[in-house]
Every structure is written in structure tokens, then in C-alpha cells.
Image (cartoon, coloured by chain):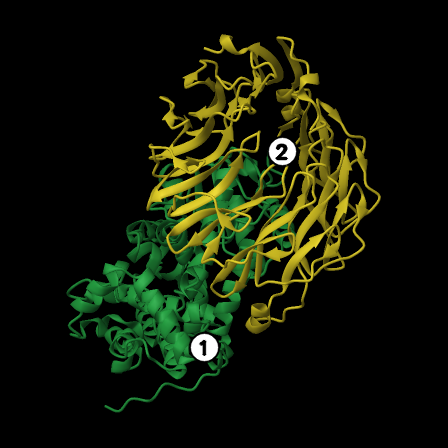
Chain colours: A green, B yellow
């Protein structure tokens, strides 16, 4: 079978950045990364891989491209790191541009392939090493780099100004009070039990999710707070661009903010990569084995609220629903069972995807891929026809996506492959669709 | 700072306000704050539909606002709150509001004596600073990290000094952020600027900068240290001097530098949170001697004991001889003094304080939703509904407790030796 070459895509973050590179600079940078930052783990993986190709069938990009071998995970390693080793780091600027495209666009670091590797090689880690090298060289897709720049300046990923953050919370508090009269978003409440943190798209473009959270916290009667300072955004695209210094800076402030507010735990909204950053990748960038403050993902949080009776489900959503398993909370943390409990409690007609749980395919947007922005949208959608097929096979009209990357990524996919289907967060089922009981005495006008 | 020797240190218990009554009287009662001397307790309350004000010791400010939040007592016990009327924001101080109005104000700061009050401001989508009701003349594209010197005479902010179009990653590399001191921008711009700090007298300014994609530095009074590093953290001025110290990442790990040269021989996986002794001769920091373990290092010597989760909020004794810090291990919070952990732990613990002679350490702890006072590792068997951090008397013999018990906010001075 003849396969198409990669389509040309213009991205100044790659096209223009490589013009500043010299072979000497490239060699020096790669040498530093390999010698000073990558230890036995890299060597063991590189020496162990026998290039069997079993990882190919694990990758949604490879499947969606009719098993085009260049999209097989092993090929992505072979065309990047293996070449680098073979050429003793003497690679060209053009090579770095291709390596960046492979590492940032053609791999989202979802780690599904590791489960199909007979040796359990963390292939996503190997591609993350390539990203680190690209970041050190300044060869990063433009929009992803801009997101990382925003993180480095504002500690949030969408250049949200400090006043815009606070103002949005105050405005959403008012909206929440239209649903639950006692709802508040308590800012800077030292000693609260919980700090609730979200990712920047919430105040920027999905502010109603903040009101939904306030409603849920009010009905559950919880003691919570949100910071009125930087440190509220739990997302971390620097972790994915390869800027580990900024990644560590972000995670430090997120946890420092929680400790300044003297909370017992952080509850985070519905986002997968943020969980990976806050819980198991980010702390390592600052020398910590564990997060300084325990972090609870929204899936676990809602599950606990329902099982403990703090909120009650009084209505089931009627339309046929399926669910996307976010890689970083399900494959990475095993929350797939709790996610299915939620779906069965909230939905009358829940239809699971196949494959599912940790074997589910990535949305194709996570790992920083969607943050690579408009130049790559078409590429991303084509590279995940598999997800469209999965969704269509369920016959669902709604895809629940407890992750912002999944949410935005699947929105693009259903436009192409499953028109008429919609995406929702769990909090939208709980609040907007009325699945959660709002006791009469808490309603505006109620006694 | 106001001389806390002037506070009433006579052993006594005084009921200041009935907070339960306040809670019953208004439809919304937000978070309580208390003054340092314990004489006042304040809270934003809702007095009508879309109408808020501050309630101080049970008495309402005369003015009403569409919003009032972030009430904070200054060191001189004046209450400053952020208030909005007719969609315009300003600052209310003890019930009087500044004349100048803004689209938004936030991040209230006080000088050490409370005499000066400042906030960050936004007007016409431009950002600036307002001190005691007087705004700076210039505005900026964005500002962050607003800092006031102890005497309040100098104000520094980090500001965006160049326009940046959407996703313009190349102009960003050239540097768009810099420092503004007393409304005068410095010439140099950097990729990133963080952790601006002022010397006590406001004469010196230091900060972290990112000069290139992978290069970080420390700037003191506008000059970049000659050595460039793989990473840096917050610098701090040695009190009473213009000497700037900062943790910097070198080939051997993080090192502590002063004015551009190493002062500790040890290298650590991590160094941050510098704290200076009152006599300015000693410095301690939180350090990671190995991956996943953290502790305190004082003058280049790390405590033998290490912790898995957190070490923070170190404090020197007034005589500069001892150091106490908050620790967390296995998700339990405690206090460690000179490397010796307290035998008790809590759900949460607050920053410890030394007695004047350095012989005792007091801290507030939380357990099962109740608050306690602990001294030298012993927990006083007296739970409180609310409790603010205990303050030691100047003579070290007494402690000021600010707490709510039975719905009443109380101020109590009691001999330290009665807390058992």
C-alpha cells in the first residue's frame, strides 16, 4: 500500500525557529540533554526496544492513517532518537523540524502504546525527551510555545490578567446564586478544607463551569476556597512543550498557593493533563516525589459526593451517552471504574466505548497537541478518525468528556465524523441538566 | 511596624464581639479577619439586596457598596477593604473611601507601620498602582508582583513594557517585561521577570530574570550578575545591607549565592525560601538533600532529619540562635525546631513563633475541625471554634490569643506557663 507523505503545514514556531540553528548548537544541546538530563532510563529503553512494531496497533494516529508505518510509535522513535544516536547528535536544522513535528504533533504522550509493548517501554517518555531537546533549541509549534510563554508570565495558560480572574469569579458567584441562593465562591479563605483549582479556559471561555462548581459546593455544604492570586491555574503546557523549568515553577506555585491558604487538599476541575502535572509529573520537576498537597480529580470528587450522600441524584439524563476516558486520569490513575459509576448514576442510556478504560484511545488533543493551534487542527482531526469510528459505533448523541483537552478535541472530531453529537462535562449533567437535587430551601425564593 | 510593646499585655480576657449574633443578623456573612493587637474583628456582611459593608466589632461602616471584599487590617489596625459602587472600584479605609475610582483594584499591600496602603489598579484596560488614593501617573500593559518597601517609600512592580501580539513568540524572546520602581521603568527588558524584592530601606531592588530560552539570572539594581544559571529562585536582601542572596542552579546542583558568588559549599537538589536571622548574620533555606526529601539548611548545614512532603515557613528566634519550621510527612503537619521534630502532629499547622528569649515555640494547630495552641510540642487541651495565630509578648512570658469560643470573639493575654 502506498502512503501519502506528510501534508505541508506552515508553523513559524518550527519553520522560522530552525533558521537560527547551527549544527554545532544542535549537537551541543542534544549532548547536554542526553548526558546531563537523561540517565539509565533512556539507555535501557533504547537498548531494549527490538523494533517489533507491536506498538503500531496501539496508536490512534497509526490506525487512523491506515497503518501507515511512519505513524507507528516505534517509527517515531526510530526517526528521531535512533537517528540522533546513530549520527552522534550531528543532525541538521531540517531534521529538528521533522523531529519536532513527530514529537509534538504525531505523538500526544498518551502512553497507550506502552501497554502493547512486550517490554513495557514508555515510548511516550522517549518522545518527551525529543520534545525537551526541541524546547531547549526553541523549536516548538508556535501556539504551544505561546501557551508556555503565557504560563511563564502569568502562571496561567491563556494570558488571563489577575483582575480578570477575580472579576470572573465574582460574576460567576452571582450567576450561581440564581440557582442556589447560598452559593458563594469564597476567595482567599485561609483554613478552608479545599482549594478548588481549574484551568484557564474556564475563566476565559467556559466561565459557567465556575458557577456550576459553586452550585455543587454549596449543595454539598463544603468548606472551600479559590485563590485571588496567581496559582489558581492547575494546567501545565510547559510540561508538554519540554520547558521543565517553567513546568516546575507552575507546579510549585499551584501547591504553594494551596499551602498559603492552609487547605487540606486540592480538588481540581475536569481536566486530565492538569492532574498529570499536579500529581505525578510536575512535582518531579522540582525534586519532589509526591505533590505537596493531596490532589483529588473531579471524577473522584463527584463520586465521593454521591456515595457519601452529600449530593443526591434525582434525575437521569435521557439521551444516549458515551464517555471518553481521559488518558491521564484513567490510564494514568485508574479512575475508569469511578467514571463508569458516575455515567450509570447520571445517565439512563449509557453506552460504553470499545475499547474502553485504560485501553480506550486518546482524544488526540491531549499532551499539548491541541495547544499547537489552528495550523494543526486538520492534521489532528485526520489523525483520529479512530475516535470518530468509536463514537459512531456507540450510537450516542452525547460524549461526556471529564477533561478540557478531550472536550475540545472531541468537539473537532464529531464535527467531522459524528455530526449531531455533542460533548458535555460531568458538571453540566449535574447542574445544567438537573441530575443533581437542589433542595427547595436552597433555591432562590425557597425557605 | 507599630511597637507591639504598646499593646495591652496585662493578663486578661476580653469579649470583643458576638460573632454568632453577627451571623444571625445578616443574610450573608463572609470570612472574619482580626487585627494584630486582637482588639478588632471585621467581616463583610450583606445588608440588603446587592448591598454590602464591613462589620467591625459588630458595628457597620456607614457606607454601603455593591461589593466589599478582601478586608485586611494593617499593622496599625486600620481596616482596608476593596469596595465597588456604581461599577467602580476603590479602597475603603476605616469606612472612608478613596476619591480615585478604577475599573478594578486588588492585592492590597501595607507598609510595615501600616501608614501607607497600596493596591494594583486597572483603568481603560491599562494597569498601574495607587498608593493612599494617589495613582501613579503612568499606566502599563500589565503589571504583577506589586511590592512595597518596609517604610512604604518605594514601590516596585513587574510590568509588561512592550506590546505583544497574539502568539508572537519571537518578540517575546526579545524581552517584553521589566521592572518599574516608583513609576519609572528600567531600561532593560527580559523574557521573564519574577520575584521582585526590595531592601528594607527601599534603596535596592532585586529579581529573577530569564535572559534566553534556557538561561536565567539574578538582577540587582538593574545589573545582571555576571554568571548565568540553569535556573534561579526568589532572591532576598540581607537585612540592613544591599547584599542580594539567591538560590541558583549550577552544574553541581542548586547553590546559594550572595552578590554573584557562592557562599555555601553544599549543593542541593533544591534550595528556596531564604529567611534571614534578625541580626542579619545568618540565613536559612528549605533544601532537598536528595530527590523526594526536604529539610532546612542553616548557614550551609542541613538538618539531619528530612521530610517527604513539605518544609516551609522557617523562622529564626529573636536572638538569631534557633530555627523552627513547619513540616509535613505522610500528610501530617507538625513543627520541627533545630532539627528536632515535635512529638505531636495535626491536620494543619500554622507558622511557629519563638518567645523573646528563644526558649519556647508556640504554634496554632488544627485537628478534627477544632483549633488548638501548642507550646514546645505540648498541645493545650482547650479547643477553639476559630483561632488566629498566637503572638508572644515582648517579654516572652505571655501569649496573646485571639479566638472564638461559644460564638464570642475574645482577646486573651495569658501567661505562657499556663498553657499546658
Q: Residues within 10 Å of mark 2 (few under 14, many from 20)?
A: some
Quadrant holding the C terminus of chain B: top left
x then y, percent, for residue A322: 35, 62
x then y, percent, for residue A366: 39, 65
Quick check: B38 above or below B103?
Answer: above
**Residue drawn at x 69%, y 31% as measured from the top left:** B74
x then y, percent, for residue B124: 76, 59
- Compared across the picture, whether A266 is left or right of B149 comes to left
Q: Which mark is residue A296?
A: none
**Residue drawn at x 33%, y 69% as measured from the top left:** A31
Q: Nearer the viewer, mark 2 or mark 1?
A: 1
Secondary structure found at label 2: loop
**Residue drawn at x 56%, y 73% as measured from the top left:** B170
Q: Quadrant of residue A356?
A: bottom left
- Where is mark 2, residue-wise? B30
Mark 2 and mark 1 residues within 8 Å of each other at the beta carbon? no
- Compared across the picture, whether B169 is left or right of A320 comes to right
- Where is mark 1, residue-wise? A376
Secondary structure found at label 1: helix
Whether residue A395 is visible here, answered yes or no, is no
- Exactly how many numbered labels are in the figure? 2
Amino acid at each position: 500500500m502506498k502512503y501519502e507523505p506528510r501534508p505541508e503545514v506552515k508553523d513559524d514556531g518550527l519553520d522560522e525557529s530552525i533558521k537560527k540553528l547551527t549544527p554545532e548548537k544542535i549537537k551541543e544541546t542534544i549532548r547536554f540533554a542526553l548526558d546531563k538530563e537523561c540517565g539509565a532510563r533512556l539507555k535501557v529503553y533504547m537498548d531494549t526496544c527490538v523494533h517489533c512494531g507491536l506498538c503500531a496497533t496501539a496508536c490512534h494516529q497509526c490506525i487512523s492513517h491506515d497503518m501507515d508505518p511512519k505513524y507507528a510509535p516505534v517509527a517515531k522513535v526510530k526517526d528521531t532518537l535512533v537517528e540522533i544516536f546513530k549520527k552522534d547528535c550531528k543532525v541538521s536544522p531540517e531534521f529538528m523540524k521533522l523531529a519536532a513535528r513527530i514529537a509534538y504533533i504525531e505523538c500526544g504522550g498518551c502512553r497507550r502504546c506502552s501497554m502493547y509493548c512486550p517490554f513495557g517501554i514508555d515510548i511516550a517518555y522517549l518522545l518527551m525527551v525529543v520534545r525537551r531537546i526541541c524546547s531547549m533549541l526553541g523549536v516548538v509549534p508556535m501556539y504551544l510555545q505561546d501557551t508556555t510563554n503565557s504560563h511563564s508570565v502569568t502562571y496561567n495558560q491563556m494570558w488571563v490578567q489577575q483582575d480578570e480572574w477575580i472579576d470572573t469569579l465574582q460574576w460567576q458567584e452571582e450567576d450561581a446564586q440564581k440557582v442556589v441562593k447560598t452559593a458563594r465562591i469564597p476567595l482567599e479563605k485561609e483554613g478552608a478544607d479545599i482549594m478548588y483549582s481549574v484551568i484557564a479556559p474556564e475563566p476565559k471561555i467556559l466561565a459557567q463551569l465556575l458557577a456550576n462548581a459553586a452550585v455543587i459546593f454549596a449543595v454539598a455544604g463544603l468548606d472551600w476556597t479559590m485563590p485571588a492570586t496567581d496559582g489558581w491555574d492547575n494546567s501545565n503546557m510547559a510540561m508538554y512543550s519540554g520547558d521543565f523549568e517553567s513546568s516546575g515553577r507552575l507546579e510549585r506555585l499551584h501547591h504553594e498557593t494551596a499551602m498559603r491558604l492552609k487547605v487540606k487538599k486540592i480538588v481540581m476541575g475536569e481536566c486530565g493533563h492538569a492532574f498529570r502535572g499536579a500529581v505525578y509529573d510536575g512535582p518531579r520537576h522540582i525534586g519532589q516525589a509526591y505533590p505537596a498537597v493531596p490532589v483529588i480529580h473531579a471524577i473522584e470528587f463527584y463520586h465521593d459526593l454521591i456515595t457519601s450522600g452529600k449530593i443526591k441524584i434525582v434525575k437521569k439524563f435521557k439521551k444516549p451517552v458515551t464517555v471518553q476516558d481521559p488518558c491521564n486520569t484513567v490510564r494514568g490513575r485508574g479512575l475508569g471504574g469511578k467514571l463508569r459509576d458516575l455515567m450509570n448514576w447520571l445517565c439512563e442510556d449509557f453506552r460504553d466505548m470499545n475499547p474502553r478504560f485504560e485501553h480506550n484511545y486518546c482524544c488526540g488533543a491531549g499532551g499539548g497537541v491541541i495547544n499547537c493551534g489552528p495550523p494543526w487542527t486538520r492534521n489532528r482531526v485526520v489523525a483520529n478518525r479512530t475516535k470518530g469510528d468509536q463514537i459512531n459505533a456507540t450510537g450516542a448523541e452525547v460524549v461526556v468528556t471529564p477533561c478540557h483537552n478531550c472536550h475540545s478535541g472531541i468537539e473537532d472530531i464529531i464535527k467531522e465524523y459524528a455530526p449531531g453529537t455533542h460533548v458535555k462535562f460531568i458538571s453540566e449533567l449535574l447542574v445544567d441538566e438537573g441530575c443533581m437535587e437542589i433542595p427547595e430551601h436552597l433555591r432562590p425564593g425557597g425557605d | 511596624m507599630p511597637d507591639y510593646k504598646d499593646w495591652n499585655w496585662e493578663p486578661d480576657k476580653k469579649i470583643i464581639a458576638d460573632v454568632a449574633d453577627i451571623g444571625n443578623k445578616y443574610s450573608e456573612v463572609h470570612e472574619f479577619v482580626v487585627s494584630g493587637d486582637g482588639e478588632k474583628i471585621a467581616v463583610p456582611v450583606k445588608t440588603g439586596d446587592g448591598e454590602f459593608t464591613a462589620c467591625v466589632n459588630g458595628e457597620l461602616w456607614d457606607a454601603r457598596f455593591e461589593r466589599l471584599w478582601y478586608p485586611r487590617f494593617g499593622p496599625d489596625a486600620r481596616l482596608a477593604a476593596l469596595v465597588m459602587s456604581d461599577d467602580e472600584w476603590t479602597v475603603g479605609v476605616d469606612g472612608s473611601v478613596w476619591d480615585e475610582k478604577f475599573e478594578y483594584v486588588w492585592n492590597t499591600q501595607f507598609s510595615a507601620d501600616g501608614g501607607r496602603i497600596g493596591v494594583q489598579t486597572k483603568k481603560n484596560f491599562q494597569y498601574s498602582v495607587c498608593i493612599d488614593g494617589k495613582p501613579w501617573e503612568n499606566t502599563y500593559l500589565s503589571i504583577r508582583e506589586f511590592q512595597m518597601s518596609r517604610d512604604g517609600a518605594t514601590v516596585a512592580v513587574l510590568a509588561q513594557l512592550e506590546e505583544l501580539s497574539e502568539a508572537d513568540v519571537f518578540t517575546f524572546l526579545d524581552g517584553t517585561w521589566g521592572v518599574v520602581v516608583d513609576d519609572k521603568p528600567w531600561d532593560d527588558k527580559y523574557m521573564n521577570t519574577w520575584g521582585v524584592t526590595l531592601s528594607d530601606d527601599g534603596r535596592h531592588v532585586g529579581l529573577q530574570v530569564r535572559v534566553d530560552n534556557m538561561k536565567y539570572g539574578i538582577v540587582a539594581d538593574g545589573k545582571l550578575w555576571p554568571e548565568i544559571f540553569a535556573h534561579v529562585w526568589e532572591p532576598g536582601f540581607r537585612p540592613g545591607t544591599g547584599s542580594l542572596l539567591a538560590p541558583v542552579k549550577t552544574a553541581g546542583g542548586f547553590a546559594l549565592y550572595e552578590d554573584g558568588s557562592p557562599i555555601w559549599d553544599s549543593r542541593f537538589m533544591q534550595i528556596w525560601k531564604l529567611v534571614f536571622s534578625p541580626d542579619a548574620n545568618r540565613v536559612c533555606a528549605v533544601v532537598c538533600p536528595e530527590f523526594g526529601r526536604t529539610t532546612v539548611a542553616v548557614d550551609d548545614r542541613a538538618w539531619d532529619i528530612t521530610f517527604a512532603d513539605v518544609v516551609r515557613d522557617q523562622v529564626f528566634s529573636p536572638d538569631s540562635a534557633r530555627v523552627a519550621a513547619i513540616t509535613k510527612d505522610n500528610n501530617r503537619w507538625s513543627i520541627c525546631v533545630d532539627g528536632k521534630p515535635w512529638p505531636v502532629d495535626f491536620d494543619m499547622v500554622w507558622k511557629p513563633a519563638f518567645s523573646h528569649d528563644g526558649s519556647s515555640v508556640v504554634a496554632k494547630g488544627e485537628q478534627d475541625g477544632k483549633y488548638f495552641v501548642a507550646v514546645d510540642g505540648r498541645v493545650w487541651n482547650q479547643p477553639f471554634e476559630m483561632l488566629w495565630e498566637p503572638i508572644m509578648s515582648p517579654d516572652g512570658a505571655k501569649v496573646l490569643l485571639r479566638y472564638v469560643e461559644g460564638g464570642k470573639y475574645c482577646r486573651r493575654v495569658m501567661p505562657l506557663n499556663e498553657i499546658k
